[in-house]
């Protein structure tokens, strides 16, 4: 289902469609070229980095612009625990919206009041379905410019098109960072322990 209320331009995209899949989005109904085409962009200029957008950092201001919006969704940022939410923009926001992050790192959120009533975060462990509702693309020519594509429905259903709220973001500094989960940290610790033991054995 293609949902939109506002869109700047639609570019025609060639037959080549690059699809990215992960355990979270194995059934996802999207392609990189298809999503970027919704806002007049192509994969020639943008790199898909979704999955590295758990938490964000930004020591300065950031500029936001709605490129495509559906229903009554609104977006903002919160601290790493998902608290102290600050509204940035919604479907009625016109032009660039500038804000200075109050937290470092922070998580983006998408509120969906009146439609599904959920709040989704870029930090997927805060989401009720535990899945990633934000796909992120970075501008190849400007590493501080991003396109954010949100899915506003639970990813356990068939509608996984990530075209419900699209925002262009320009950060002064920083960007998305991948925060290891506890299991990953445990594996790293075991690996370091193994290296230490191997080195000790070799020296003795």
Image: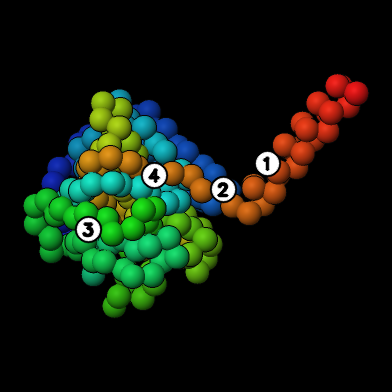
- On-image quarter of the C terminus: top right
Give the residue drawn at x 45%, y 51%.
54
Q: Work out whether residue 181 or residue 129 is closer to the camera in this orientation and state it.
A: 181
In the displayed structure, does residue 187 sit left or right of residue 66? right
> Residue extending furthest front?
204
Give the number of the disc on residue 175. none
Q: Work out whether residue 124 or residue 165 is closer to the camera in this orientation and state it.
A: 124
Give the residue drawn at x 34%, y 42%.
175
Residue denoted by label 1: 188
Q: CA distance from mark 3 to mark 4?
A: 22 Å
Residue denoted by label 3: 69
Element under disc 1: helix
Question: Residue 155: horizontal and vertical position, in percent?
Answer: 48, 60
Residue denoted by label 2: 180
Of callouts 3 and 4, which one flags the residue occurring earlier in the amino acid sequence? 3
Question: In which quadrant of the rendered view does residue 199 lie?
Answer: top right
Residue denoted by label 4: 176
């Amino acid at each position: 289902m293609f949902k939109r209320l506002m869109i700047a331009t639609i570019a025609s995209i060639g037959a080549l469609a690059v699809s990215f899949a992960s355990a979270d989005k194995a059934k996802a109904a999207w392609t990189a070229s298809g999503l970027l085409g919704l806002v007049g962009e192509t994969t020639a200029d943008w790199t898909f980095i979704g999955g590295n957008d758990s938490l964000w950092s930004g020591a300065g201001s950031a500029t936001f612009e709605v490129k495509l919006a559906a229903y009554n969704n609104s977006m903002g940022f919160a601290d790493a625990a998902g608290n102290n939410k600050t509204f940035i923009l919604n479907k009625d926001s016109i032009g660039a919206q500038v804000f200075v992050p109050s937290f470092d790192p922070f998580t983006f959120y998408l509120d969906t009041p009146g439609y599904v009533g959920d709040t989704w975060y870029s930090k997927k462990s805060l989401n009720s379905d535990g899945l990633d509702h934000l796909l992120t693309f970075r501008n190849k020519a400007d590493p501080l410019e991003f396109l954010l594509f949100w899915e506003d429905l639970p990813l356990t259903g068939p509608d996984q098109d990530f075209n419900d709220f699209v925002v262009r973001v320009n950060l002064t500094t920083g960007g998305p960072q991948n925060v290891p989960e506890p299991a990953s940290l445990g594996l790293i610790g075991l690996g370091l322990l193994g290296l230490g033991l191997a080195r000790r054995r070799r020296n003795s």
